[in-house]
Image (cartoon, grey):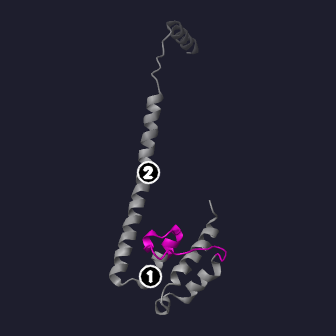
């Protein structure tokens, strides 16, 4: 697996490739500082080509690139209605992930499973009383008094 810094620098190259397709007026919506960061940290040796015959959903791009482009769209290009829908979907997705984590790592459920496995593994042990030992204990008690 690639180092995260390598993946980010490659994704910056992909992002800049897509941003190069925008008109100058649309490109001005994105802060210059953000663009400068992409240029500064992109991987110059990485080659990325856009297949203009495919829609953007079918392009072969990294997950990091998709995330950056979606954040750029949400922050700088989406209208208010689109922003609200995107934020609501992100919130819903995060809630689903949290619910899955809660169910998977629920401490009560984990303890219950452990206790069930302990009970299943235990066998009933029968202790037999020895009358001789009982007699010896009673005699010792008498002498201690």
Q: Residue 82's image quarter?
A: bottom left
Q: In the image, is residue 124 part of the stretch drawn in magenta?
A: no
Q: Which of 10 and 47 is in front in this view?
A: 47
Q: In the image, is residue 63 part of the stretch drawn in magenta?
A: yes
Image quadrant holding the C terminus, namely top right
Q: Name the residue under label 2.
A: 104
Q: Position of residue 62 (x, y in %)?
A: 53, 68
Label 1 sits on a secondary structure element that is helix
Where 4 sits versus 145, above or below? below
Direction from residue 37 to residue 125 in the image, left or right: left
What's the CA distance linking mark 2 and mark 1?
33 Å
Q: What stretch is highlighted in magenta?
A: 43-68
Q: Nearer the viewer, residue 23 or 37?
A: 23
Residue at x 40% of width, y 52% of height: 103
Label 2 sits on a secondary structure element that is helix
Q: Sequence-wise, which precedes: disc 2 or disc 1?
A: 1
CB-based contact (under 8 Å), mark 2 and mark 1: no
Q: Residues within 10 Å of mark 1 (few under 14, many from 20)?
A: few
Where 97 sits versus 84, above or below? above
Q: Where is residue 141 in the image (x, y as percent from the top left)?
A: 54, 14
Q: Which residue lies furthest to the front in this view?
A: 53
Direction from residue 105 to residue 83 in the image, left or right: left
Residue at x 57% of width, y 73% of height: 11
Image quadrant holding the N terminus, namely bottom right
Residue at x 44% of width, y 37% of height: 115
Q: Which residue lies furthest to the left in this view?
A: 81
Q: Name the residue under label 1.
A: 75
Q: Position of residue 136 (x, y in %)?
A: 55, 9
Q: Residue furthest bottom?
A: 25
Chief secondary structure of the magenta span? loop
Direction from residue 84 to residue 25 in the image, left or right: right
């Amino acid at each position: 697996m690639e180092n995260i810094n390598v993946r980010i620098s490659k994704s910056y190259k992909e992002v800049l490739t897509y941003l190069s397709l925008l008109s100058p007026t649309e490109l001005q919506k994105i802060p210059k500082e953000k663009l400068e960061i992409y240029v500064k940290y992109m991987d110059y040796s990485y080659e990325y080509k856009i297949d203009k015959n495919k829609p953007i959903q079918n392009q072969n791009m990294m997950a990091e690139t998709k995330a950056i482009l979606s954040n750029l769209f949400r922050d700088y290009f989406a209208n208010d209605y689109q922003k609200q829908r995107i934020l609501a979907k992100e919130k819903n997705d995060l809630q689903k992930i949290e619910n899955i984590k809660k169910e998977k790592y629920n401490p009560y459920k984990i303890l219950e499973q452990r206790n069930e496995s302990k009970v299943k593994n235990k066998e009933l042990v029968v202790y037999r009383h020895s009358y001789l030992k009982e007699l010896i204990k009673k005699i010792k008690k008498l002498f201690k008094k």
